[in-house]
Image (cartoon, rainbow, N blue to C red):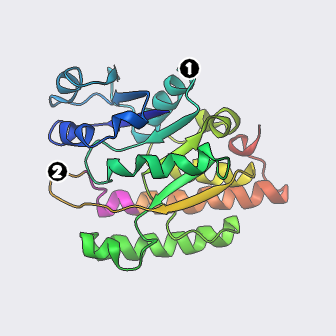
Amino acid sequence: MVVVMPARQAAATLKQTVDEIPLESVSKILLVDDSSTDETVALARELPLDVIWHPHQTGYGANQKTCYLHALQSDADVIVMLHPDGQYEPGLIPDMVAPILAGEADLVMGSRLLIPGAALKAGMPRWKFAANRFLTTIQNRIMGTNLSEAHTGYRAYSRELLLTVPFLRNSLDFSFDSELLYQAIAFNFRIKEVPARCRYFEEASSVGFRTGVVYGLKTLWAGVRLVMHRAGIWHSRKYRR
């Protein structure tokens, strides 16, 4: 099992995040740095990590593409995405991978909203909570699912899923996550949620309001494309094998 960490300006939180990873459950930790201007790469090289760096900033989605390509070429059977900003709890990794190893799921999502009230209590801004619930409700209608949260950045994927869905065709930015979720549904992969505690503090990376609006619109558009693809109205390469 390989943990991948898409990093950008993560020097302030990286060491604590890595220290909390249960190393006995992990075969490799891969950090991909998206051209940080702080000490992320220098610090990462002092930790028990494999480090790859982008010479130019490419975006969150592009960073994940590098993460998954290298994890797959390391023969990983399960790949966990963990943000290095400390917002998600690394100790949850064994619970994230267990359903995949047991053959019960292909994608496991660490949901901040699965336990009612937990996200707001942890400090999630109310506008983000409302936007998350709104988008998730629409996406559930599109996908025929009943997810508590479709926008978590804490995910575990089976090798089969990442070898099957054409994730390299996805967006370079934050909408990559939504597109990959839609792809999992389009290819009939099994999804399971586990409750994930989150932490909000000054150093944790956070999407601002304007970026959040763009992300929301792109998420809805990707859902529309999935509906049109399924109906045979407008086929998309993102949903074709």
Q: Identify whether 121 is placed above or below 162.
A: below
Q: Which residue is mark 2?
A: 203
For marks 2 and 1, the one nearer the N-term is 1
Could you say where residue 198 lies in the image, as x and y percent from the top left? 31, 61
Q: Find out whether residue 206 is within the magenta segment.
A: yes
Residue at 47%, 27% (x, y): give it.
66
Q: Is residue 97 left or right of residue 34?
A: right
Tell me the quarter of the picture where residue 195 sits. bottom left
Q: Is residue 112 left or right of residue 156?
A: left
Q: Identify whether 126 is placed above or below 156.
A: below
Tell me the quarter of the picture where residue 221 sits. bottom right
Q: Which residue is mark 1?
A: 73
Could you say where residue 169 lies in the image, as x and y percent from the top left? 61, 36
Viewer-closest of 68 and 231: 68
Query: In the rendered image, is residue 175 in sight?
Result: no
Could you say where residue 187 lies in the image, as x and y percent from the top left? 74, 48
Could you say where residue 192 lies in the image, as x and y percent from the top left? 59, 59
Residue at 76%, 41% (x, y): give it.
240
What is the crowding at mark 1: few (fewer than 14 residues within 10 Å), some, or many (at least 20)? Answer: few
Image label count = 2
Q: CA distance from mark 2 to mark 1?
A: 32 Å
Callout 2: SS: loop
Residue at 80%, 57% (x, y): give it.
230
Going by the numbered disc 2, the residue's amino acid type is Glu
Q: Which residues are magenta?
A: 205-212
Callout 1: SS: helix
